[in-house]
Image (cartoon, rainbow, N blue to C red):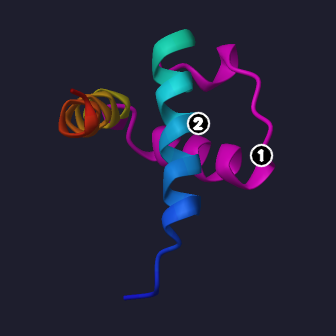
Amino acid sequence: MSEVSLSQLASDLSRLHRLLSFADGDPDEYEFSDPCFEAALRRRLKSDPAQARQLRHNASDVALLVSD
């Protein structure tokens, strides 16, 4: 397993949260600022559209862990 950059992870989670919150998980309705993140996310969602629901669930779990 490769070393994970915590700042990159935080950045990706923030992008994912915005996509799920503002565009309801639809990448066509969201303006990406990182083409690599966009390409990876589109590939993942295209191969398995149900992953949007799983990503939403995971993002909610993370938010609960870090909230007051």
Depth check: give the residue in front, 30 or 60.
60
Q: Which mark is residue 15?
A: 2
Range drawn in magenta: 24-51
Residue 24 visible (yes or no): no
Asked if residue 26 is positioned above or below residue 63 in the image, the reply reads above
> Does dot 2 land on a helix, a strand or a loop?
helix
Residue sitting at x 58%, y 36%: 15
Q: Secondary structure at mark 1?
A: loop
Q: Which picture quadrant has residue 49?
A: top left
Q: Horizontal placement of 68 versus 12: left or right? A: left
Q: Is residue 68 above or below residue 38?
A: above
**Is residue 4 shown left or right of residue 42?**
left
Dot 2 amino acid type: Arg
Q: Amino acid at mark 1?
A: Asp
Q: Residues within 10 Å of mark 2 (few under 14, many from 20)?
A: some
Label 1 to label 2: alpha-carbon separation: 9 Å
Q: Splitting the image into 4 quarters, where does residue 68 fall?
A: top left
